[in-house]
Image: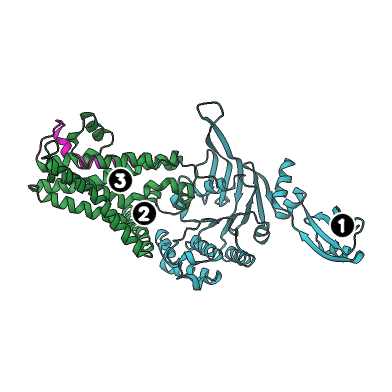
C-alpha cells in the first residue's frame, strides 16, 4: 500500500532536514555568515595547493589541474557526505543528553533520525568551493563516454565511502561516549590525505588507504582512469573501476557496526 | 478462545551494566557488573493507570527503557502489546507514547504546529484522525493560542502540555510518563492530572507514570508498583501501601499556651516544642475527628497537616524486607 521502505525513509529524512533548515533560518545572519566562513576556510586549502605549485613544476608527475581533479573530487564527496549525514558524529552527545533515547521511541529507523538531526546547509560553502575546483579541473580532462561514466560513479561512490566511514567510526561512541576526535582522525584525516596524489606517499600508506580505510577509491583510482595514467604503484587496473564496490562494501560494513552498536547501547543513568 | 493477555507483561526481567572503575593503586581498571533491575515481574492490563515509584537509582528509568525497547534486557522476558520491545522497537513505537519530563522533543525554534506536522508524517497518522486529535488535545490542554508560538517562548507548563500532545497524536495504547509534573506550579499540575484522567476515561489509554509526587499518584492511580534495588517491593493500591509501610500523617498543632502533651484518641504526640506539638496518626485514617477532638479540648492558634513522604514509606517498606 505504501511506497517501498527506503523511499519512505528518504522522505522522512528530507522532512526532518527541512524542519532544521527552517529552524536555522530563524537566525538568518548567523546562517549566512557561517556558510560564507565555511566556504572561505575550505577555499584556503586549495589556495595553499596553488601557492605550492608556483614553486613546483609538478607533484610527483601530477600537474596542477590533475591535482585539482583529485582535490575537487575528494572534497566534493566529503562535502556531500558531511552535509547529508554529518550529525552522526555527534551521537556521543545524543547519548549523554538522552536525545538518542527519545529518537529510539519514534517509528523511524534511528540512523535516519540521527543523520537528519540538526541538518545544516552551513557546509554549502565547502560544497560550492569543491564544485568550483572540480569543475575547473574537468575542463582539462579529455572526456570519453566511459570516462564520464567513471566520473559520475566516482562522486557517488566517494560519498558512499565517506558515509560508511562517518557512520562506522561514529559507532565507537556507543562503547565509549566521547571519541569524536578518534573518529575524525580517520574520516577528516582520510579526506585530507586524498587531496594529494597518493604517489607522494610510501607504498605502505597507499596499501592502508586501499584495503583498511578505502579512501583511495574515493578519488585516486578513478582519477587515474580519467587521466589515462598508469598506476605508479602498479596496482591492478581493475581497481580503477572498483569504486562502486568499495562504496557498497564500506557502507555495508558500517551498517553492520551500527546495528551492533545500537544493540550494545546502554543509555545513560536517568 | 484467546487467552487473556496483559498489555504489558514482564517476567523475571533483569538488566545489569558493566562498569569500569579505577581502583586505587592498580594500573588497570577493574570491571564490575552493576545490577540495575533484577527479577522484576509485573503485568498491566489495558486501561490501567499505574504509578511506578521508587527512590532515585531504584531502576525506574531502566525499566521504562526496557519496556520501550531502548535497552535490551540481560535476563528475563518483556512483551508489550504482544511485541518484544528491543527486537520490534520501531513497530512498537507506533503503539506507545513516551514523555520524558525533563527533555522536550519539540523543535525549539519553531512553532508547536511544525513539530506536530512532522510527527504526523513520521507516524503516518491519517490526516482526518490527526486533525481530530490535535483539535481535541488543544482544547483539553488549552493550547490554542500557543500553536503558532515558537517553543522557546512557551512556559514550562505549556511546553509540557505540548510534549504530551506530541506523544498522543498517534493514539498510543500505552503512555509512559517520566516525572510529568516536575517543576510545574500547582494549577498546571492540577490541569495536567485532570487531562490524564479524561484521556484514560475517554480512550482507555493505559498509563504508566513514574513520579516523586505522591499527589500525582493519589489523583490518578488505582495501583502503585514500588521498586527498590531493582526489584518490585510492592504492587497494589495506594491505601494498601500506606498500611503496609505503616506510614503516618502528622498533625502540627500550635496551642495558644504551652501545655503538657495533648491527649486525643487515635493520635500520639511525637514531639513538643513550646506551644507547638506534633501528633502522628495512621495515613489511612481521617484527620477530621482528630482535629475536632484537639480543637474541642484545647485553645488552638493554628493547625496544619503533613502528608507522609513517599520516600519514607518506601524506605520503611524496604527496611522491613516486605
Q: Tell whether B282 sits left or right of A170.
A: right
Where disc 3 sits, the SS reads helix
The residue pinned by badge 1 equals: B274
Q: In which quarter of the image is the C terminus of chain B?
A: top right
| Image quadrant in which you'd find residue B320 | top right
The residue tagged 2 is A116
The percent position of residue B133, horizontal first and vertical second, equals 49, 68
Residue depth check, mark 3 versus mark 1: number of the one nearer the observer: 1
Write the residue at 39% across / 53% down.
A113
Q: Which of the numbered marks, if any, corresponds to residue A231?
A: none
Say whether residue A255 is magenta.
yes
Q: Do labels 2 and 1 share a chain?
A: no
* B151 is within the stretch colored magenta: no
Mark 2–mark 1 Cα distance, whole angstroms, equals 66 Å
- For the question of whether residue A3 can be seen, the reply is no
Mark 3 to mark 1 CA distance (whole Å)? 74 Å
Could you give the CA–CA distance between mark 3 and mark 2, rounded to whole angstroms?
13 Å
Part of the protein shown in magenta: A229-258
- Give the chain ID for the cyan colour: B
**Nearer to the camera, B81 or B62:** B62
From the image, tell me which residue sits under label 3: A163
Amino acid at each position: 500500500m505504501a511506497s517501498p521502505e527506503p523511499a519512505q525513509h528518504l522522505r522522512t529524512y528530507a522532512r526532518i532536514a527541512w524542519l532544521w533548515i527552517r529552524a536555522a533560518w530563524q537566525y538568518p545572519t548567523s546562517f549566512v555568515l557561517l556558510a560564507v566562513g565555511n566556504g572561505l576556510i575550505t577555499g584556503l586549502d586549495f589556495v595553499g595547493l596553488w601557492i605550492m605549485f608556483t614553486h613546483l613544476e609538478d607533484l610527483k608527475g601530477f600537474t596542477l589541474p590533475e591535482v585539482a581533479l583529485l582535490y575537487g573530487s575528494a572534497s566534493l564527496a566529503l562535502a556531500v557526505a558531511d552535509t547529508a549525514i554529518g550529525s552522526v558524529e555527534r551521537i556521543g552527545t545524543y547519548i549523554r543528553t538522552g536525545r538518542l533515547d527519545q529518537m529510539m521511541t519514534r517509528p523511524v529507523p534511528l540512523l535516519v533520525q540521527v543523520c537528519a538531526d540538526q541538518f545544516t546547509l552551513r557546509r554549502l560553502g565547502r560544497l560550492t568551493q569543491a564544485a568550483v575546483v572540480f569543475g575547473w579541473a574537468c575542463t582539462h580532462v579529455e572526456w570519453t563516454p566511459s570516462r564520464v561514466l567513471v566520473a559520475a560513479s566516482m562522486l557517488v561512490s566517494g560519498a558512499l565511502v565517506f558515509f560508511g566511514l562517518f557512520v562506522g567510526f561514529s559507532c565507537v561512541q556507543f562503547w565509549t561516549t566521547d571519541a569524536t576526535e578518534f573518529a575524525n582522525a580517520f574520516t577528516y584525516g582520510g579526506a585530507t590525505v586524498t587531496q594529494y596524489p597518493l604517489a607522494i606517499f610510501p607504498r605502505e600508506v597507499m596499501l592502508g588507504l586501499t584495503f583498511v580505510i578505502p579512501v583511495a577509491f574515493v578519488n585516486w583510482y578513478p582519477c587515474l582512469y580519467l587521466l589515462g595514467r598508469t598506476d605508479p604503484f602498479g596496482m591492478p587496473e581493475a581497481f580503477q573501476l572498483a569504486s562502486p564496490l568499495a562504496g557498497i562494501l564500506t557502507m555495508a560494513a558500517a551498517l553492520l557496526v551500527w546495528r551492533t552498536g545500537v544493540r550494545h547501547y546502554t543509555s545513560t543513568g536517568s | 478462545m484467546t487467552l487473556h493477555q496483559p498489555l504489558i507483561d514482564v517476567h523475571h526481567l533483569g538488566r545489569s551494566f558493566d562498569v569500569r572503575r579505577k581502583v586505587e593503586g592498580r594500573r588497570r581498571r577493574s570491571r564490575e557488573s552493576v545490577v540495575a533491575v533484577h527479577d522484576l515481574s509485573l503485568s498491566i492490563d489495558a486501561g490501567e493507570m499505574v504509578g511506578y515509584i521508587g527512590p532515585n537509582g531504584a531502576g525506574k528509568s531502566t525499566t521504562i527503557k526496557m519496556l520501550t525497547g531502548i535497552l535490551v534486557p540481560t535476563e528475563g522476558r518483556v512483551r508489550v502489546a504482544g511485541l518484544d520491545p528491543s527486537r520490534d522497537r520501531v513497530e512498537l513505537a507506533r503503539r506507545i507514547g513516551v514523555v520524558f519530563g525533563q527533555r522536550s522533543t519539540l523543535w525549539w525554534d519553531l512553532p508547536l504546529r511544525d513539530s506536530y506536522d512532522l510527527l504526523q508524517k513520521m507516524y503516518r497518522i491519517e490526516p482526518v484522525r490527526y486533525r481530530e486529535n490535535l483539535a481535541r488535545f488543544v482544547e483539553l490542554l488549552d493550547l490554542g493560542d500557543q500553536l503558532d508560538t515558537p517553543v522557546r517562548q512557551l512556559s514550562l507548563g505549556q511546553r509540557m502540555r505540548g510534549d504530551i500532545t506530541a506523544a498522543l497524536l498517534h493514539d498510543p495504547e500505552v503512555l509512559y510518563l517520566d516525572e510529568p509534573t516536575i517543576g510545574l506550579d500547582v494549577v498546571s499540575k492540577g490541569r495536567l492530572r485532570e487531562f490524564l484522567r479524561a484521556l484514560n476515561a475517554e480512550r482507555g489509554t493505559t498509563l504508566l507514570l513514574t513520579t516523586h509526587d505522591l499527589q500525582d499518584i493519589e489523583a490518578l492511580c488505582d495501583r502503585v508498583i514500588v521498586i527498590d534495588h531493582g526489584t518490585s517491593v510492592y504492587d497494589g493500591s495506594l491505601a494498601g501501601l500506606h498500611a503496609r509501610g505503616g506510614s503516618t500523617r502528622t498533625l502540627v498543632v500550635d496551642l495558644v499556651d504551652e501545655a503538657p502533651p495533648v491527649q486525643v484518641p487515635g493520635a500520639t504526640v511525637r514531639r513538643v516544642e513550646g506551644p507547638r506539638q506534633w501528633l502522628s496518626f495512621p495515613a489511612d485514617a481521617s484527620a477530621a475527628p482528630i482535629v475536632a477532638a484537639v480543637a474541642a479540648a484545647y485553645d488552638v492558634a493554628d493547625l496544619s497537616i503533613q502528608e507522609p513522604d513517599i520516600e519514607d514509606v518506601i524506605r520503611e517498606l524496604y527496611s522491613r524486607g516486605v
